[in-house]
Amino acid sequence: MAQQGVLLDQDQFCCSVCLDLLKEPVTIPCGHSYCRSCIEGCWDQDVLKGVYSCPQCRETFTPRPILRKNNMLAEVVDKLKKTGLQAAPPPALCYAGPGDVECDFCTGTRKQRALMSCLASYCETHLQPHYEFPAFKKHKLVKATAQLQEKICSHHDKLLEVYCHTDQQCSCYLCTMDEHIGHDTVSAAAERTEKQRQLGMSQQKVQQRFQEREKDLKELQKAVKSVKSQEGLPHHITLSNHDYLMSPIHGSLSLSLSLSLSLSLALSLSRSLTHTIQLNQIKVYLSRALNTTGISTLQ
């Protein structure tokens, strides 16, 4: 058990850039720690931009932070190195298979959760600090999916947390400072809530019209049934001479009127059925839209 605890600690004190035990560990302003050479190498690539970011949580810093050795962390790492123990490989079930997405911080391991604040995916081992350290507990954890990149700005690598009404698309907060400057924008969460409200109202209206059409349809069906029953009634009537002479005309008119009425009811019934089917299809579509909400990037 003691050895298992050491192995877990050793894994937690690995640099997320080189995946080895920290060498001359330094802690940057956001609280993440790296090998001095690793973080300096990352930041050297951002010199022209003038903006430096954490490889894990993507928090940006301007100007470039001054790096100081984390002495306490260095002592812990030295003790781990002296034990001579190697980190145990993760269980076979943790390896990524078909349909899985790999952990961003170790090779081949299946990720369990993705962090919207870090914009990175973690296996169970590398996820532990987010459960244990107060600085990470505010990070939003979501289920790891292959569609995570769809929620990240392709230009700035920031979360798509703004919705632009002018261009009808999601963007990051940096986009609002250049290509979307001066546009009508709201938070993605607010837009998602509004879209769901509108879909809900549309669904209620369609449901009401659907119920009205169902009522009309039942009345038409009742009328058709009534006409059919009247056409089948026997005519036990004694006719006078006048009635006898006029009966062919009356019969013809009655039959014509009956057929015309039946045809009219049939056409009305057909139109009502068609409209009811269309309304039902719209109702199903809105119901699915309300559940899945085609604006998944607004989550």
Image (cartoon, grey):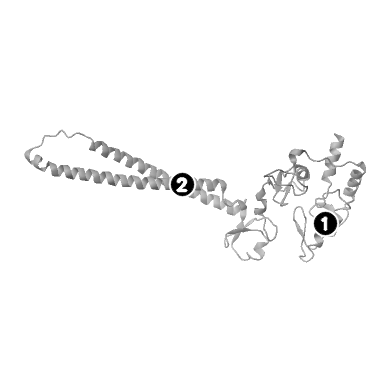
**In the depicted structure, whether residue 206 falls above or below residue 5:** below
In the picture of the structure, the residue carrying the numbered disc 1 is 39
**In the depicted structure, whether residue 80 falls above or below residue 30:** above
**In the depicted structure, whether residue 194 falls above or below residue 64:** above
- Element type where label 1 sits in the image: helix
Residue at image coords 11%, 43%: 246
Foreground mark, 2 or 1, reads 2
Residue at image coords 39%, 47%: 274
Mark 2: few/some/many CA within 10 Å (<14, 14-19, 20+): few
Image quarter (top left, top right, bottom left or bottom right) of the N terminus: top right
Let me know if residue 204 appears in the view: no
Dot label at residue 105? none
**In front here: 283 or 162?**
283
Q: Quadrant of residue 143?
A: top right
In the displayed orientation, state which residue is furthest to the front: 98
Amino acid type, callout 2: Gln
Horizontal side, residue 267 vs residue 253: left or right: right
Residue at image coords 66%, 64%: 177
Residue at image coords 32%, 47%: 267
Amino acid type, callout 1: Ile
Residue 80 lies, in percent from the top left, at 89, 43
Residue 55 lies, in percent from the top left, at 77, 55
Mark 1: few/some/many CA within 10 Å (<14, 14-19, 20+): many
Horizontal side, residue 140 vs residue 238: left or right: right
Earlier along the polypeptide chain: callout 2 or callout 1?
1
Residue 206 lies, in percent from the top left, at 45, 48
**In front here: 56 or 134?**
56
In the picture of the structure, the residue carrying the numbered disc 2 is 281
Let me know if residue 241 appears in the view: yes
Is mark 2 in CB contact (under 8 Å) with mark 1? no
- Element type where label 2 sits in the image: helix
As measured in the structure, the alpha-carbon distance from the residue carrying label 2 to the one carrying label 1 is 56 Å
